[in-house]
Amino acid sequence: MDKDKYGQYEIIDAHSHIFPEKIAEIATVSIGNFYEMPMSGCGLSAKLVESGEKIGVSMYLVCSTATTPHQTAAINRFIANECSLHPEFYGFGTTHPDSEDLAADIDMIEELGLHGVKLHPDFQKFNADSPDAFRIYEQIEGRLPLLIHCGDNRYDYSAPKRILNIHKNFPKLQLMAAHLGGYQRWDDAVDILAGLDNVRFDVSSSMAFMSPEKAAGIVRRYGAENCFFGSDFPMWTHEEELERFFALGLTEEENRLVLADSFKAFLGL
Ligand SMILES: [Zn+2]
């Protein structure tokens, strides 16, 4: 890609995944299978940085989710440790609605110096607006932001209407709705989720599935000040997602917002 095109911008990756070395390959393959897509790399920190450096990423929101409650502590320690090795990492921890001690999980996330919580209802198999999930939001509203996977027309766990329901019940929760608010459910998502306070969106794993005109229209309905750039690494390389992003033909100001400024404003960086 032409460096003149992106060299002028600060770029933050608001959605990326890393895995411990022992499981990185297996985890990457199983995500690829889940989405029936080839993955761009293996989810190791070194590979993430190698991919991001090609476009000059200055900060990465890194996360991983626990498919069972007993994995939570180990994952959170892993993310925190990677953050201590990579100052450019901004770590989010995770928990699970079936956790025996949610309050302890959230305390641990804070004690480890992590900055938010990542949930993936489809992997973790819970309805995003179920009473069990609400116990998590009760703990973190006004305390830690939530990055939540959204959408997928094969499942209903994280459908846009459920994301709206979270917001209605927890209006002060800082909600980051991944994949433009609803992977493969973009029309619904933008109708249901545009214009809500405290709700933001990342553009990861979305632009590859629609025309640039459509993606630009969605970003503008949400407002560029509410949208973040993200790679969903190892799903895509940074170069691929940035190329798709520039194809949207947004204004310089909108580019600046989505690539870094909206994220910094939302998280007070
Ligand atoms: Zn994710």
Image (cartoon, helix red, strand yellow):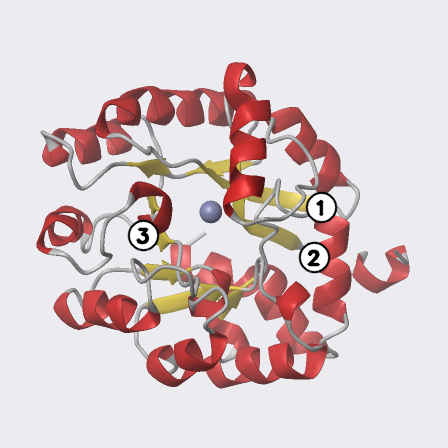
Please name the residue that numbered disc 2 is placed on.
241
Per the rendering, the mark at residue 146 is 3
Give the left or right position of residue 247, taking residue 74 as reference: right
Mark whose residue sits in front, 3 or 1 = 1
Question: Within 8 Å: ligand 1 and the Cβ of disc 1?
Answer: no
Quick one: which residue is furthest to the top in this view? 22
The amino acid type found where label 1 is placed reads: Thr
Give the left or right position of residue 180, taking residue 191 as reference: right
Residue 19 position, x and y percent, is 51, 27
Q: Residue at x 50, y 62 (%)?
A: 179
> Vertically, is 117 above or below 165?
above
Mark 2 surroundings: few (<14), some (14-19) or many (≥20) residues within 10 A = many
The local secondary structure at tag 1 comes to loop
Q: Residue 30, can we see it?
A: yes
Q: Is 131 in front, or is 105? A: 131
The local secondary structure at tag 3 comes to strand
Residue 117 position, x and y percent, is 32, 43
Quarter in which the N terminus is drawn: bottom right
The amino acid type found where label 3 is placed reads: Leu
Asked whether the residues under the numbered discs 1 and 2 touch, taking CB atoms below 8 Å apart as contact, a structural biologist would say yes
Please name the residue that numbered disc 1 is placed on.
237
Question: Within 8 Å: ligand 1 and the Cβ of disc 3?
Answer: no
Residue 226 position, x and y percent, is 46, 71
Mark 3 surroundings: few (<14), some (14-19) or many (≥20) residues within 10 A = many
Asked whether the residues under the numbered discs 3 and 1 touch, taking CB atoms below 8 Å apart as contact, a structural biologist would say no
Mark 1 surroundings: few (<14), some (14-19) or many (≥20) residues within 10 A = many
